[in-house]
Image: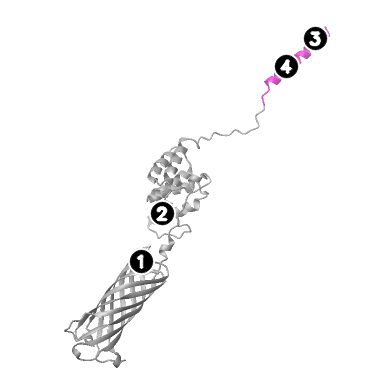
């Protein structure tokens, strides 16, 4: 009887242990649960990809619509950057400023942050009327409208392809560069109160020739000019006159715009006239005259291309002609005033 009772007790204990083992909690799996990523494949991502595809194809107006739709469903900071690039390309400075500021606030350490900061600073200067500040990056968005790569958008479709500005266009001798240029010219002149030239109080003449310049700085050039001059005389005049005209001066150019397309010119100089006088009617022999002519030129230059321009200018000067046979002083000569209108075509060499 005692043996049977002991066996029953042992069986009861075994049954309780088995039941407790079955009810014990199972150990947790040894892995970390990952959140679902609905951003990549959601509607916002599809609109973003559509906007970037349109931007790459040059359709910035269509890209703006897609970026607006994407931002209603996504908080991806690069969408603000891409939309800002489109606004900048379309000439919408204030929306571009707002988008760039948002992008830099949300992603201050983005890989292209310095470029976006430069763009933002440039737009802020333009809209505030401040002179543009100097930056290392003067690039502009390319015609493809591609997007700069960042940590959040490293794909090839988001690559920003910058187009370097044509700095050489500003470095020509007719703009801000140094170098040579040549200019054929035509000048119509009036010599006033020059009664010693042909017995009249006013004499008109035309001169054709060439000017050679060497630009020494963005605002100045050494000017050398030489031409053939023919006076307008009739059979009633006492003489026929022709000769050589020359000038050495320094041309100061004041640009009227940042690209030097229009310039105001001031060129003080010293000219020299060498004239051959032939008296009509056999009244005398041929003789030569000369005169130093201090003069100043005021003009306007308009660039047709970076290396070609048209000049229109006016000269004023004064001369005291003398016959070489009576040099250095000829008491028979009086002061003569020069007024001239000039037109020339300038080419950079």
**Bounds of the magenta segment:** 1-26
Disc 3 from disc 4: Cα separation: 17 Å
Residue 98 in view (yes/no) = no
Q: Look at the numbered disc 1 and give the secondary structure of its residue.
A: strand
Query: Which residue, given by chain and number where applicable, does mark 4 sit on?
Result: 16
Query: Which residue, given by chain and number where applicable, does mark 1 sit on?
Result: 308
Q: Residue 123 shows which numbered tag?
A: 2
Nearer the N terminus, badge 3 or badge 4?
3
Query: Which residue, given by chain and number where applicable, does mark 3 sit on?
Result: 5
Disc 2 from disc 1: Cα separation: 32 Å
Q: Closer to the camera, 25 or 71?
A: 71
Q: Residues within 10 Å of mark 1 (few under 14, many from 20)?
A: some
Q: Seen from this angle, which residue lies furthest top?
A: 1
Q: Which is closer to the viewer, label 3 or label 1?
A: 1
Residue 16 percent location from the top left of the image: 73, 16
When the figure is inspected, residue 187 is found, relative to residue 275, above or below; the finding is above
Disc 2 from disc 4: Cα separation: 81 Å
Nearer the N terminus, badge 1 or badge 4?
4
Residue 248 percent location from the top left of the image: 36, 79
Q: Report the predominant secondary structure element of the magenta stretch.
A: helix
Q: Closer to the camera, 320 or 342?
A: 342
Drawn side of residue 123 relative to residue 342, left or right = right
Drawn side of residue 195 relative to residue 8, left or right = left
Nearer the N terminus, badge 3 or badge 2?
3
When the figure is inspected, residue 160 is found, relative to residue 23, above or below; the finding is below
Quarter where residue 167 is shown: bottom left
Q: Look at the numbered disc 2 and give the secondary structure of its residue.
A: helix
Q: Residues within 10 Å of mark 2 (few under 14, many from 20)?
A: some
**Considering the image in quadrants, where does the N terminus appear?**
top right
């Amino acid at each position: 009887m005692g043996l049977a009772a002991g066996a029953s007790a042992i069986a009861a204990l075994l049954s309780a242990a088995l039941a407790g083992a079955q009810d014990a909690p199972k150990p947790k799996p040894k892995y970390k649960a990952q959140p679902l990523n609905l951003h990549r494949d959601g509607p916002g991502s599809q609109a973003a990809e559509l906007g970037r595809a349109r931007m790459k194809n040059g359709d910035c107006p269509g890209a703006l619509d897609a970026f607006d739709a994407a931002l209603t469903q996504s908080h991806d900071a690069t969408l603000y950057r891409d939309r800002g690039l489109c606004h900048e390309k379309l000439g919408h400075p204030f929306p571009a400023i707002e988008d760039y500021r948002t992008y830099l606030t949300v992603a201050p350490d983005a890989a292209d942050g310095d470029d976006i900061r430069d763009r933002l600073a440039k737009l802020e200067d333009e809209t505030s009327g401040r002179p543009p500040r100097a930056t290392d990056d003067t690039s502009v968005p390319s015609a493809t409208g591609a997007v700069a790569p960042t940590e959040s958008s490293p794909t090839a479709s988001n690559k920003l392809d910058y187009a370097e500005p044509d700095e050489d266009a500003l470095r020509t001798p007719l703009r801000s560069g140094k170098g040579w240029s040549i200019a054929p010219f035509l000048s119509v002149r009036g010599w006033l109160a020059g009664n010693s030239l042909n017995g009249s109080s006013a004499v008109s003449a035309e001169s054709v020739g060439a000017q050679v310049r060497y630009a020494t700085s963005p605002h100045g050039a050494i000017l050398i000019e030489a031409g053939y001059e023919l006076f307008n005389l009739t059979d009633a005049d006492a003489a026929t006159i022709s000769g050589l005209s020359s000038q050495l001066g320094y041309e100061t150019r004041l640009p009227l715009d940042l690209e030097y397309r229009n310039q105001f010119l001031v060129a003080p100089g010293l000219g020299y006239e060498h004239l051959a006088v032939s008296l009509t009617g056999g009244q005398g022999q041929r003789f030569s005259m000369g005169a130093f002519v201090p003069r100043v030129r005021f003009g306007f230059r308009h660039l047709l291309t970076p290396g070609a321009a048209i000049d229109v200018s006016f000269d004023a000067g004064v001369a005291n002609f003398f016959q070489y046979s009576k040099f250095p002083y000829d008491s028979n000569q009086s002061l003569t005033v020069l007024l001239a209108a000039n037109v020339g075509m300038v080419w950079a060499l």
